[in-house]
Amino acid sequence: MSGFGHKTIIDPANVDLVHHLLMFECNPTVVFDDNNLPDEFPEIAGYPVGGNFEIKYYMVQMHYDNPKKMSNRRDSSGIRFYLGNELRQHDLGYLTFGTDSNAVGIAIPPGANRFILDSYCPVSATNQFPKSGITVTTAFSHTHLQGSSVWTKIIRDKKAVDYLFNAESYDFNYQFENRFPKPVQLYPIKFLISVGDEFATRCIYITMNKDEITLGGESTKDEMCLHMFTYYPRMNDFYSCMNANSEKAWKQTPESVRKWQEFYDNAPRLPIGGRARNYTLEELPRLPEYIDLKPSECKKDISSKGIHETSFISLTIISFLTTLITNFFIKQ
């Protein structure tokens, strides 16, 4: 069976709270206990459902934006799928380019008018494409509040040949799936001569309105750099090609080590205490000063022999007292 369309359903009573939702395919190896349609897929391809398709479970993740912290609100938003009785020729898949959404991948300084974050998907990854290549039909660009532009370029023989998709004027509050007017064909290594397609992805951020660093993460105040594409035929073992900063990037010199130590000595701290999900936070502008312990003197005149003899005498006395007390109680 093939799914030929889907529609995101937002509860009308919660339009002010529901920000977006994500649906994940669940690893199939994991065992669990238990005529005018919206977002229609291309006629030649559909999302596989049931039968021999390995994905049996899904997880929907809802993201809400509730800055006023309103309570007593119930939500029934979700996704509606449309299934057809006829199996389509190809199965659809999803492929994501960009940068890992964590502090290792993304760290944007405040006060930046144009901060560029580049990532690259090399041929060593794209050689997993089928020999016939893949056909891309839609694009979805995603950053958070500081993002202003997202694009991915097709690189062939180390030369940019075209945009796979260019969201040059990106708006966090106006995100949608972009259907290509004409599908784009992408290729792996061809005939062992021509290098296969590679991809360069760029996200641009503006942080002029911030006075603190922005790190990668799921919260709206954090940042992401994701470019997601729908394609066919589906590859069941290739979902994304993402970047993160290598550990080798953190090579240090004596001067940088000194500055790093200075940074840690003077950095504000955010103590976190309490039970899980009930933490208390109180920022410390810097670590408090306190009267430290007096350094202890090392008495070099005490030999190890003397220490051993003292220890032996102490143990002997303890053993003698233990025997004496035991005999006293037995006699009683």
Image (cartoon, rainbow, N blue to C red):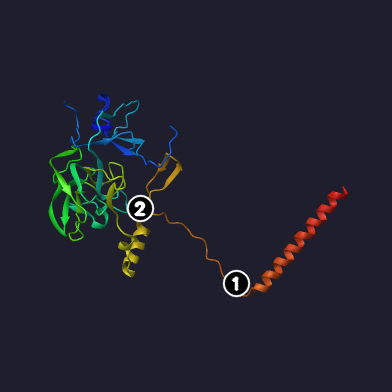
SS at mark 1 in the image: loop
User: Distance of mark 2 from mark 1, alpha carbons?
Assistant: 39 Å
Q: Is residue 238 visible?
A: yes
| Residue 189: quadrant of the picture | bottom left
Q: Which residue is denoted by mark 1 in the rendering?
A: 299
| Residue 311: quadrant of the picture | bottom right
Residue 216 screen position, x and y as percent: 29, 48
Task: Count neighbours of disc 1 (C-alpha within 10 A) and say few if under 14, some if 14 to 19, many if 20 or more.
Answer: few
Q: Identify which amino acid the numbered label 1 is placed on.
A: Lys
* Residue at 49 percent of width and 60 percent of height: 292
Q: Identify which amino acid the numbered label 2 is placed on.
A: Pro
Q: Is residue 122 visible?
A: no
Please determine whether, in this image, residue 53 is positioned above or below residue 287. above
Residue 47 screen position, x and y as percent: 26, 36
* Residue at 32 percent of width and 69 percent of height: 253
Q: Which residue is denoted by mark 2 in the rendering?
A: 268
